[in-house]
Amino acid sequence: MKDTNDTSSIFKDPIPAVKVDDLTVAYNYKPVLWDIDLEIPEGVLMAIVGPNGAGKSTLIKAIIGILKPLAGSVKIYGKSYDKQRSLVAYVPQKGSVDWDFPTTALDVVMMGTYGSLGWIKRPGLNEKKAALEALEKVDMLPFKNRQISQLSGGQQQRIFLARALVQDASIYFMDEPFQGVDASTEIAIINILKSLRKAGKTVVVVHHDLQTVPEYFDWVTFLNVKKIATGPVKDIFNDDNLTKTYGINYKVSIQE
Amino acid sequence: MDIQDYFSLVFSDYTLRTITLGTAILGAVTGMLGSFAVLRKQSLLGDAISHAALPGIAIAFLITGAKDSNTLLVGALISGLLGTFWIRGIITKTHLKSDTALGLILSLFFGFGMLLLTFIQKQPNANQAGLDKYLFGQAATLVEKDVWFMAIITALCLFVLLLFWKEFKILLFDKDYAKTLGFNIKTIDILITSFIVLAIVLGLQTVGVVLMSAMLLAPAAAARQWTNSLGTMVVLAALFGAFSGVFGTAISASQNNLSTGPVIVLVASVFVIFSFLFSPSRGLLFKHIRISANRRDLEQQKTLAFMYHIVENHENISHPHAIKILNNFQGFTRKTLQKLVDKNYVTLNGNLWSMTEKGFAKAANLYNHQTKDDE
C-alpha cells in the first residue's frame, strides 16, 4: 500500500491508485487507444463509458498487462504494475472462458488464491476457507460443487466476482460485469461494489448502460480512443460530454 | 489362446510382457497429456506433430545410415519440435487460426517425409526396409530398453504434472487471468507442448505416425464423459490409455495377422464409444432416459392442467366427470390418467373421474414456480 513513512503525502496530493500516462495501444497500426492520460484516485467507484470500439476493454487490459501498449506507462500507487500485482484484481468479460472445462464453482474461486501462493505451492485449508467466504459474499455457496457450465449467466458472473474478491486486492478492474445478467444478480453485484468502495478499495468498471451511471458510480471516465473527460459524476456526467463521446446530440436523439 | 494361457504367458513370455508393459505405459502417458491437448482445443496438435516427425526419421537415417530406434527418434523429436515451433509461428504472426496452421504443417511435413521415404526406397544400397514401420507402428519390435525409457519419461512427466498442477489448470482454463496473477504463461505453455511432443515421439514406434493422434485423443475424450474434475479426468484418461495398450496387445497376440498398433487404437475407440453411450451424466443412453422422463412428466402436467380447467368452474372440485370429455384433450391417454391416479391427484370411479384436494392444489401451482431452486 502507500508508504506510511512518506510524510510528503501530508503536504502534497495523495498518490492516485492508478496513474496512466500517454498510453497508446494499436492493433495493426490502427489506434485503439490514443495518448491516454488518466488519474484514478483511491476509493472511487468509477465507470468507463464510451461507444463500441472505444477501447474500454483495451484500456483495462493494457493497464493490467494482458495487452502490450505501443507507448505509455501505468503506475499503481506510484510504482510499476509488475511490482504491485498483488494489489490488483481483474474480473474479465464472461465470454472469455471455456465454460465446458471440467471444474466446479469452488475450484474457479480458489484460482483467485493462486497469485498469492506463487509457483508450485498448493492451495490449502486457508485458501479453501477464503474461497468459501467469497462464495458466500456473492450468494453462491449452495452452488459450490456445481460444474460451471451448469450455471446461468448471472451465476457465472458472480463466480468471477468471487474469484476476484478472494484476492483481497486494493484495486478491482471489471469488464462489463453487468452485461447479460438478470436483475437480482445486477443488484447483488452493485451492492458488493459499493461495499468494496466503503472499505476503501478502488473499483473501475467498464460499463455499457448509461442510464445507471449516476445511480451506481461516483466517478466516470468518458472514452472514445482518446480520453474525453474524467472526474466525479456529479460534475462531468452531462450532455456536453455525452455528445463529445458518442458523437450524436445524445439528449435530442432519445425519442419520446 | 484363452484367458488362462494369456495370464501365464504375459508373465513368462519376454516378448508379450515387454510389449504389454510398453503399450500400457505409452497409453498412460498419452492419456495424461492428451487431456491437456483436448482441453486446450488443440486436439489435432498430436496429429500434426506425429505427421511432422516423419521427415525427421527419414533425414536421421539419411545422415547416419543407422536404423536403431534411438537415432531415428532423435530425428523425429527434432522434426516434431520444428513443426510445433512453426505452427506456433503461423498462429501468432498471421491471421490464420490454429486449425489451418495444424493442417498446413501436417501436410507439408508429411508430404516431405513421404517424398524422402520413397527416395530412400529407390536407393540401391540403402536397406530401407523397416523405416516405413514408423507409419503404422510395429509394437513387436519393442525391447526392454525401450520400455525402461518410456517408464522414465512417464515418471518425469508425472512429476512435472504434479509439481505444476495448479499452473497447468489455470493456464488451460483462463489464460488472461493467469497472466494478471503474474504467472509466466509462455513457460508453462512450452512445457506442456514439449511433453506432448516427447510422448508422441515415444509412441511412434508402437502405434506409428498415422494413428498416434488417436492415442492422444481417445482416452481423454472418453475420460471427459465420466467426471467434472480435471484431476479425475487425467487419471481416468491414463487408465483408459493403459488398458487400451494391454487389451490391444492381448487381442493382437492371440491372433495371427493382427498388427498391434491399429488394434490398440480400436480398443481405445471402443472405450470412447462406450463412454459416449453409457456415462451417467453425459452419455446418450441416460440422456435419452432423462428426456423421456421429462416428456412423461410434461404429459401428466398438461393433462392435469386440462382437468383443472374443467374442474375450477365447479363449486365442488371433486364433482365427478365422465372420462369421455377428456378425449377432447389431444394428448390424453389412459396411461397418463392412471399415473395421475397413482399419484393421488385424481380418483377413478368406473367411468367417472374426480380431482382430489391434492391434485387441485398441484394443478393450481403448476406454472407458478419461481426459479430459485435448480437454475
Image: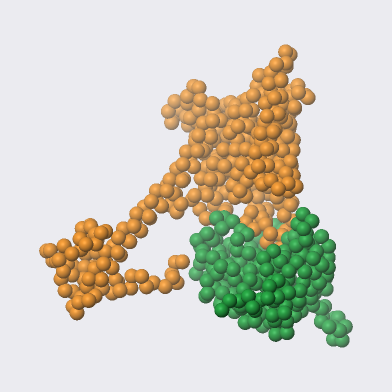
In which quadrant of the rendered view does residue A134 lie?
Answer: bottom right
Q: Is residue B59 left or right of residue B18?
A: right
- Quarter of the image where the N terminus of chain B is located: top left
Q: Which chain is the one coloured green?
A: A
Q: Picture quarter containing residue A5? A: bottom right
B44 vs A190: above or below? above
Across and down, in percent, residue A92 comes to 65, 65
| Image location of residue A162, percent across then percent down | 60, 70
The answer to whether one can see residue A27 in this image is yes
Q: Nearer the viewer, residue B113 or A52?
A: A52
- Left or right: residue B202 compared with residue A31: left
The reply to whether residue B206 is visible in this rendering is no
Q: Is residue B363 left or right of residue B209?
A: left
Q: Is residue B347 above or below residue B191?
A: below
Position of residue A79 relative to residue A149, above or below, is below
For the point 51% across and 25% down, the residue is B258
Residue positioned most to the bottom: A11
Q: Colour of chain B?
A: orange
Total marks shown come to 0
Which residue is pictured at 60% across the width and 76% down the height? Answer: A254
Image location of residue B189, percent across then percent down:
70, 50
Q: Residue at x 63, y 64 (%)?
A: A93
Residue that lies at the very extreme toward the left in this rendered image: B350
